[in-house]
Amino acid sequence: MPKVRFQALAESRNRKHTEMNEAGKRSELFGKNVFNEDKMLQFLTKEAFDNVKSAIFQGNKIDRKIADQVAEGMKAWALSMGATHYTHWFQPLTGATAEKHDAFFDILPDGRGMEKFGGAQLVQQEPDASSFPSGGIRNTFEARGYTAWDPTSPAFIYKTTLCIPTIFVAYTGEALDNKAPLLRALYAVDQAATGVAQYFDKNVRKVYATLGWEQEYFLVDKALAKSRLDLSMTGRTLVGNFSAKGQQLDDHYFGVIPPRVLSFMSDLEKECTKLGIPVKTRHNEVAPNQFELAPVFEEANLSVDHNLLLMDVMEEIADRHHFSVLFHEKPFAGINGSGKHNNWSLATDTGVNLLSPGSTPMKNLQFLTFFVNTIKAVDTYEELLRASIASASNDHRLGANEAPPSILSIFIGKQLSNVLDELEGVSKGKLSPEEKTELKLNVVGKIPEILLDNTDRNRTSPFAFTGNKFEMRGVGSKTNCAKPMTILNTIVAKQLTDFKKEVDALIDKKSLKKDEAVFNVLREYIKTSKRIRFEGDGYGMEWQEEARRRKLSNNKNTPEALQVITSKESLELFKEMGVMNEVELKAHQEVELGAYIFHIQIEGRVLGEMVYNHIIPAAIRYQNILLKNVSGLKEVYGAAHKNVAESQLNILEQVGEHIVQIKKLTDEMIDARKRANGMAMSNKKAQAYCNNVKPYFDKIREQSDKLEKLIADDLWPFTKYRELLFAK
């Protein structure tokens, strides 16, 4: 094994980066491989074009005749771009993407070949669903599952394949994917938010959820990554002594991007631009070999698709540049892990960001309405939002003084807190003319001025307002954004629905004017959601105590966090909003628990293999070298050899103790794993893996890392942290 390590090191040191030359403007490349509006105008009939636009913006259905026309135009464009195959590109509950390629090529009855693609192939396909996670929605022998075209996310060509974004459902209609629930949640928030937005602008006909993600990742030389069993099999290092230098000098964040990495980034951005992914920002992150990429904000469904596509493309481009890209939330101990901040807002079809203050009191009242309702939604359903970011890998990161804590709270800054405090004092019922003037001029009217000068930041907050959007910071770097976006948009939709009912009731039954009714309801929401607002240090123990007093949940691990998904309140919420039924929720919970179990199970197996097959043998080899040395000294010095060999004997004793401990702990971990595997219920098994198996990982790691520090460098089997993190 040391031979593999040193071969990998030699290979990595001989790398030469490929210079990437920019030819032309990025704007000229943008969307080149996307069947966007420009391509539709060119390749579709007017009737087909109008129907597709109507499906995108009004949600109208496309009939078979129009589908045939769209398919014909899409095929003509794809063939002109060199495509040979098509696929329904979907998001099964694995969290990644899936695809099955079919050739356009077909045989005519007379034996001649032709390219064929019709409306039936565009609109619906029937892949074998038996091997995808379903959480019990269908049995293995019931292989039928359907993919159905999502016209709101444009088709694109990747390499030589036309990729058609689709949803994935069981033959009984239940969602087997992450996209279908997201689309339902986005429809729910559109319906709820549009009704509220019309209080302030009757011309609003549609409200979109927008999303801007920030993708963090590590780049490691491909040879070095492959030389480590744990990185190859689990995406993270299960053992490894900290490098003497890590991130303590703060010299990597926003530092000069290494030339080889910059070549990778340039190549990636070029490919993304052609695929319509509007990448904008790139920079070094805090940890060595950690980087970030962020795009321009987009409509949430499209943004989710683009993030999944980006991660697929990143792996492809990284391989081209002899890198391995690591999306695991915590690939290395002792340095920062990776997240994917989700920046969320709501925007109208009239071009207004509903979470951005305006230039008039009425526009600012609109801002406050959506601002306070979002806070209220998070306060009511904070456990669900926590569940949306739960995973085995993200558990390593949350609350580790580098990422937000597992306790949900909202940071809005001191100035906006003062505004809400003033609104809390609004008189109940009708407002006097003086009170209205005071509110509109001195409270609501000053909001733009406040935000201009006071964009407070609190990096420890899991849900922070940052001027014109909310930033959800707990999302893991490899998480499908559809999960948190489905939950967030569902709870906001529910909250806005309730808000409108309350406001309308005050207008109809109490004869209040619209602005009076809005102020009255907002005042109550500000009072009842006050516990979720927190401006302090989310990392401190004091906050954990305070959160307990406020009766906020603190679900520290995934099995705990996932329990809320099938609570009575959750079932009622998702049913009322039309996002997921009870069968789907239970299935999603079952799949998430299963994924957690399998991840910990795989890590346990890999760790056992590393200990038995590599770490202990390396330690014994070093023991033998020391024993030979001590024996030689004894021959030379006789009885006095103990003084001369004191250090060697001390190291021998330490190595022996660590071998005993690491073997004992690994045996116990395997026994705990066997006991967990004997449990039938997924929730019990997940808890057993969490509480009885996983704790051994750190104990075993501690023994391994101590051995790494003792054993001669040329005998250690695994590529070390200093080699992984500082190879250029």
Image (tube, rainbow, N blue to C red):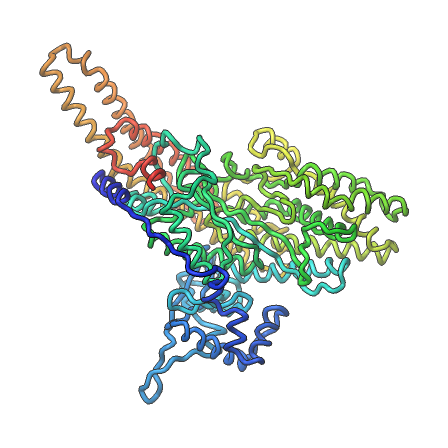
Q: Residue at x 60, y 76 (%)?
A: 50
Q: Residue at x 59, y 46 (%)?
A: 471
| Location of residue 157 in the rendering, given as x and y in whole percent from the top left corner | 43, 67
Above or below: residue 167 compared with residue 73: above
Quick check: can you spot residue 672?
Answer: yes
User: Which quarter of the figure has residue 473?
Assistant: top right
Q: Residue at x 34, y 49 (%)?
A: 323
Q: Nearer the viewer, residue 61 or 4?
A: 4
Seen as rendered, the residue at the extreme front is 24
User: Which quarter of the figure has residue 620?
Assistant: top left
Is 495 situated left or right of 25 in this image? right
Above or below: residue 721 compared with residue 83: above
Is 109 situated left or right of 286 in this image? left
Seen as rendered, the residue at the extreme left is 635
Above or below: residue 68 compared with residue 498: below
Q: Residue at x 11, y 19 (%)?
A: 632
Is 364 situated left or right of 349 in this image? right
